[in-house]
Amino acid sequence: QVQLQESGPGLVKPSQTLSLTCTVSGGSISSDSYYWSWIRQPAGKGPEWIGRISPTEIRGRTNYNPSLKSRVTISVDTSKNQFSLKLNSVTAADTAIYYCAVSGVWTAFFHHWGQGTLVTVSS
Amino acid sequence: EIVMTQSPATLSVSPGEGVTVSCRASESVSSNLAWYQQKPGQAPRLLISGASTRATGIPARFSGSGSGTEFTLTISSLQSEDFAVYYCQQYNVWPPLTFGGGTRVEIK
């Protein structure tokens, strides 16, 4: 089955860019059966969907949460079976556990998640 | 944006008892509703999709119902491993995909 693993810095300074990578194993990120998402969860709160990407052009590559769209970029590296998140101009409000997750093409619920990585925004 | 509201925020239940968690959508999401279970230090785990279809490996004591704006997750007889936080998520109208704020099921 598909497994996902997040990696990246655990501490980011305010106004800088948060960068995370999700490595996929047990399946090909190039499959046109899946979309690959980033989700975050501040402490004690519900998850917040950040955005998603499909490596297949025909599907329309990316969708973003409108509340974050101006600061977010999600990209994919099929040669490494990875996808990445960049969130710029971060503030303390961006402190959260960040998860990568996978959903089907037609049904956007998340059947596999990474273990999550805590990112703290602080000087 | 569709807002998902869960109630109650916390349920205190004894093992063996049944429990019902509610989720309300600010507008109809048809049956495009998923439920997740999250334990401390872990990622959410998919329990139910399509409002009532259990995911692979999910015990039959978990059931979901509802459509439109009102949904429920029922656990028929709580086991020790079921004490966790439960979230609903709509995937009918998006972006954005949206989650509820969660219901904590704790030991009474």
Image: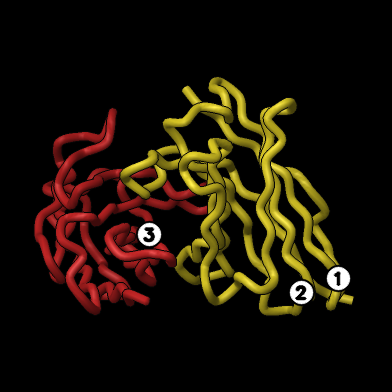
Chain colours: A yellow, B red
Residue tagged by mark 3?
A: B85
Chain for mark 1?
Answer: A
Mark in front: 1 vs 3 = 1
Q: Does A79 appear above or below B91?
A: above
CB of mark 2 within 8 Å of CB of mark 1?
yes
Q: Which mark is residue A78?
A: none
**Residue at left offset 15%, top offset 61%:** B30
Specify the amino acid type for callout 3: Val
Can see residue A57?
yes
In this image, A42 relative to B100: left or right?
Answer: right
Q: What is the C-alpha distance between the residues marked 3 and 2?
A: 28 Å
Report the Cα–Cα distance between label 1 and label 3: 33 Å
Mark 3 nearby-residue class (10 Å; few <14, some 14–19, many ≥20) = many
Label 3, secondary structure: give it: strand
Helix, strand or loop for disc 2: loop
Q: In this view, does A55 lie to the left or right of B68?
A: right
Residue B46 position, x and y percent, is 35, 44
Quarter holding the C terminus of chain A is bottom right
Q: Is residue B38 above or below residue B96?
A: above
**Which residue: 57% across, 53% down?**
A38
Q: Position of residue A100 (x, y in %)?
A: 58, 47
- Is disc 1 on the same chain as disc 2? yes
